[in-house]
């Protein structure tokens, strides 16, 4: 699967695509290099986040996957959203082959954080997944408080308090039977996804599946 837009094709001519996990140059049809394709282990984990809402993740958050996600999130490797989106699609095909989604959405950043970083990595995932599945990518969640990043907090209880009431849904669901895919890059304790799910459920979204690139639960 090649990258879709004309801009992507021009960009690839100037800056060749690289494997997210080791940095080797790859073709724009490849998700990762042959060596990483052979040696990276999928776990295809499925875990409950809250109230029967499940989350699927193709990888464990460790090693090369952890390093690649840090590059994607903090170091400007925005284009890795395409590679990671395909990994999530693969996990969905393995664990939920019959599932049909009406739309995809993502965990939002606060506007101050997004301006500083330049992009929202979770939105990049949702955008590419929407393109692959040919479904709308809907920005229907808003982060109303600029809080401390979750990764800077150690205690689980403090993480839960930190995100409580931070998200709201800006859209009313017109058909509660429609399946919504909620994307983020990593799931650890599940506090962020739980608060996003609660916000979506409050506006009528009852049929939700979460997807992340990696599961950091020990």
Image (cartoon, rainbow, N blue to C red):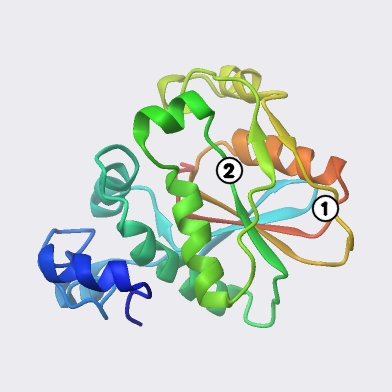
Residue 199 seen in render: yes
Residue under pointer 2:
107
Among the 4 quarters of the image, the one containing residue 176 = bottom right
- Badge 2: residue crowd in 10 Å (few <14, some 14–19, many ≥20): many
Identify the residue at image location x=40%, y=42%: 119
Residue 57 in sight in this render = no
Out of 164 and 28, give the one closest to the viewer: 28
Q: Is residue 102 left or right of residue 66?
A: right
Q: Pinpoint residue 124: horizontal percent, then vertical percent.
A: 45, 54
Q: Residue 38 carries which label?
A: none
Pick the quarter of the image with the N terminus. bottom left
Circle 1 residue: 205
Question: Is tag 2's residue or tag 1's residue first in the polypeptide sequence?
Answer: 2
Q: How many labels does the image show?
A: 2
C-alpha gap between disc 2 and disc 1 = 15 Å
**Category of crowding for the residue at label 1, using alpha-carbon neighbours closer than 10 angstroms: few (below 14), some (14–19), many (at least 20):** many
- Secondary element at tag 2: loop
Where's residue 177, x and y in %? 87, 66
Image coordinates of residue 17 in percent, x first then y, are: 18, 67
The answer to which of 77 and 36 lies nearer the viewer is 77
Q: In this view, does 21 lie above or below 98?
A: above
Give the percent coordinates (x, y) of residue 110.
54, 28
Residue appearing at x 51%, y 39% in the figure: 188
Q: Residue at x 11, y 65 (%)?
A: 14
Label 1 secondary element: loop
């Amino acid at each position: 699967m090649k990258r879709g837009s004309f801009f992507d094709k021009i960009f690839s001519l100037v800056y060749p695509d690289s494997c997210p996990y080791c940095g080797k140059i790859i073709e724009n049809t490849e998700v990762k290099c042959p060596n990483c394709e052979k040696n990276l282990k999928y776990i295809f984990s499925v875990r409950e986040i809250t109230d029967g809402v499940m989350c699927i993740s193709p990888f464990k958050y460790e090693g090369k996957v952890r390093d690649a996600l840090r590059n994607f999130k903090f170091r400007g490797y925005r284009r890795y959203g395409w590679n990671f989106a395909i990994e999530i699609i693969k996990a969905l095909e393995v664990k939920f082959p019959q599932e049909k989604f009406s739309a995809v959405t993502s965990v939002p950043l606060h506007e101050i954080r997004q301006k500083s970083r330049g992009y929202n990595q979770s939105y990049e995932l949702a955008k590419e997944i929407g393109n692959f599945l040919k479904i709308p990518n809907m920005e229907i969640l808003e982060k109303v408080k600029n809080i401390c990043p979750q990764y800077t907090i150690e205690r689980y209880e403090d993480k839960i308090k930190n995100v409580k009431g931070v998200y709201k849904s800006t859209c009313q669901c017109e058909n509660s039977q429609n399946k919504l895919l909620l994307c983020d890059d990593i799931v650890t304790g599940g506090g962020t996804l739980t608060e996003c799910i609660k916000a979506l459920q409050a506006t009528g979204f009852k049929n939700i599946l979460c997807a992340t690139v990696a599961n950091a639960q020990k």
